[in-house]
């Protein structure tokens, strides 16, 4: 008799575990939860958050100068003119190997 009752008890336990697992899976499917039976860490919480890129991009005003090639060309030309003027006065950037760091070491 004890053998039959132990089989019935274990069968009930298996059925109860299967029912609990089925309810858990159904709940996860309905509410959009992630099943994690192993308990290992996952990135699900981070990936579930809303994306905020558009909100952050909205903080900054649109810069027409960045997209307009005429404005960028004019700025580049002004930069080259200023550099040329500095070179004529010998105030431009040094040649390669002639900067402060090279002069400091005594070369």
Image (cartoon, rainbow, N blue to C red):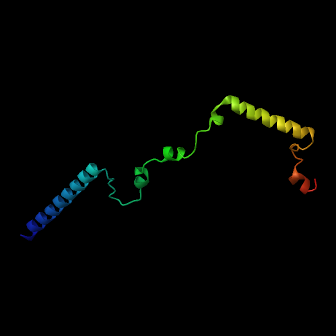
Q: Nearer the viewer, residue 20 or 6?
A: 20
Q: Indicate the position of residue 19 as horizontal and vertical percent values.
A: 18, 57
Q: Indicate the position of residue 62 as horizontal and vertical percent values.
A: 58, 39
Q: Indicate the position of residue 50 as horizontal and vertical percent values.
A: 42, 49
Q: Nearer the viewer, residue 103 or 63?
A: 63
| Image height of 82 relative to 3, above or below | above
Q: Is residue 52 left or right of residue 19?
A: right
Quadrant where the image shows the N terminus = bottom left
Query: Residue at the left extreme?
Result: 1
Res. 60 image quadrant:
top right
Q: Residue at x 23, y 51 (%)?
A: 26
Q: Is residue 30 left or right of residue 2?
A: right
Q: Residue at x 48, y 48 (%)?
A: 52
Q: Residue at x 91, y 53 (%)?
A: 103
| Image height of 2 relative to 72, above or below | below
Q: Is residue 83 left or right of residue 1?
A: right
Q: Nearer the viewer, residue 93 or 43?
A: 93
Res. 18 image quadrant:
bottom left
Q: Residue at x 17, y 63 (%)?
A: 13
Q: Indicate the position of residue 98 as horizontal and vertical percent values.
A: 90, 47
Query: Residue at the top extreme?
Result: 70
Q: Nearer the viewer, residue 48 or 70?
A: 70
Query: Residue at the bottom extreme?
Result: 2
Q: How many marks?
A: 0
């Amino acid at each position: 008799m004890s053998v039959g009752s132990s089989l019935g008890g274990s069968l009930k336990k298996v059925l109860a575990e299967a029912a609990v697992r089925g309810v858990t899976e159904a709940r996860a499917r309905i509410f959009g939860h992630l099943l994690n039976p192993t308990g290992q860490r996952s990135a699900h919480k981070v990936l579930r958050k809303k994306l905020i890129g558009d909100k952050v991009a909205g903080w900054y005003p649109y810069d027409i100068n960045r997209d307009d090639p005429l404005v960028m060309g004019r700025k580049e030309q002004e930069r080259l003119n200023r550099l040329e003027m500095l070179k004529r006065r010998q105030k431009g950037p040094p040649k390669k190997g002639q900067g402060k760091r090279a002069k400091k070491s005594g070369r």
